[in-house]
Amino acid sequence: VSDLHAPFLHRGRSYMAHIPAVGDAPGASSLSEDPGATPSTSDSSHELRTFGRAAARDPRDSVAGVMDVAPKSELLERAEERREATYLSRQREPLGASYVRGHAIPPQLLETGFGKPGEVKATVSQTKELFALPDERTPAQHAAYVKSHGSYAPGEQIRRNYSWKTREGAIENPWEYGWGGQSEKPELNQVSKALSGEGYGSTEGGASNPQMRAYIEQRRHALGKPRALGHDNTASSIEVFGKSSSTEPQWGTRECMGNYTAEQQAPDADLGRSIRPGWRNVSDDPERSFGLPMVRTDKPMPHVRGVADYQNYGDEPGARAVLNPPSYSELGVEPADFATPLPLPALVNIFARAGLAEAAAVEQAFREAGGGELGLSVIELRRALGV
């Protein structure tokens, strides 16, 4: 069998495959591109095709417009809604309404609604009965369940059925009986004395038993008095025990809080001036200030500022422009740009794209306002047009 040359097409290009005959050495087959073949455009057409649907591009849909904050007024909000009204998603799913799919609901369903009316009364709640079943047990069954499981009803008082007795006899209803003894001399205003500290440490009105009163006097720590240890040295309440920590006056709280002399309160000698010899700035003018200001209003601003020129010549905005920026600042347009003279083609382009006036009206107003080679500013041309 002789050699076989088979042409084939791959990705728009024609190739020639060389298949060796039987008995040739292994690896003799080869693949080469056919130089005489014409490339096919059946597969390369997909590289030039653009999928999707083209939409009208708004020049204001820039990066600054996408990252801009919410509208600052109702007029800007209305303008934003009009621009977004062309979006298909805004038409199908308006704000505050359901998604519009184009389904036509029968008129009878709009009146009666979907589903079949049930027979449940409005005053009956079957869901509540499913979660909380009604208790149909008798009192005897409930008592047996409490005894076996210790499960009381919500808010039920725990009763152990004790047999309470007093000197007068048995107590029939322990839950209605008042426990405790009645003092012959009750102490009044106990809460007020506890909050104000009045009567703290005294034993008046406390325990009625003399032994209990003596125990309280022995164990209670009276405020501002030494503890009673049984040494019989509590006769005098003026005597002070112990040794003083220091015999000489030392630095204390008074000195820390400002017990300084007039000389110590005087400012330092080098405050606001240099007292080092050879480093003194002596001037005959007492109001002279040394150094350079941060804002160089004394120097004229160069016509073309370099990239490394960070000097402020007084033309940069202050804190007021940062807190309350002017209009169109997010677009990089400053108020001074409206007062800069521009040639006629630039003014025609600006007013046409802004929708304020046509090209013919702008040219006529430019000539009537005396616009020459230097041109006119946007403010002057707006006054001439009356817009």
Image: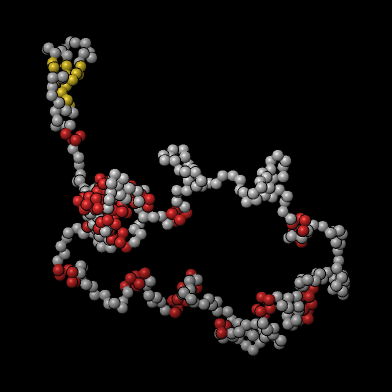
Name the image colouring: secondary structure
Up-down relation of residue 97 to residue 184 (above or below): above
Quick one: 383 or 168, which is closer to the camera? 383
Quick one: 98 or 172, which is closer to the camera? 98
Q: Position of residue 28 (x, y in %)?
A: 21, 13
Furthest residue toward left? 1
Q: Position of residue 149 (x, y in %)?
A: 48, 69
As drawn, is 71 to the left or to the right of 203?
left
Task: Quarter of the image for the C terminus: give it.
Answer: bottom left
Residue at screen point 16% across, 21% down:
15
Up-down relation of residue 337 to residue 278 (above or below): below
Up-down relation of residue 172 to residue 265 (above or below): below
Q: Quadrant of residue 217?
A: bottom right
Furthest residue toward bottom? 168
Q: Tag count in the figure?
A: 0
Q: Position of residue 74 (x, y in %)?
A: 32, 63
Up-down relation of residue 176 to residue 57 (above or below): below
Tell me, yes or no, if residue 107 can be seen here.
yes
Residue at screen point 77% across, 60% down:
259
Q: Quadrant of residue 204?
A: bottom right
As drawn, is 288 to the left or to the right of 349?
right
Tell me, yes or no, if residue 351 can be seen here.
no
Residue at screen point 28% across, 61% down:
78
As drawn, is 353 to the left or to the right of 320?
left
As drawn, is 276 to the left or to the right of 115?
right
Q: Position of residue 123 (x, y in %)?
A: 31, 78
Q: Quadrant of residue 171?
A: bottom right
Quick one: 286 or 26, which is closer to the camera? 286
Task: Quarter of the image for the N terminus: give it.
Answer: top left
Residue at screen point 24% across, 50% down:
367
Quick one: 27 or 319, which is closer to the camera? 319
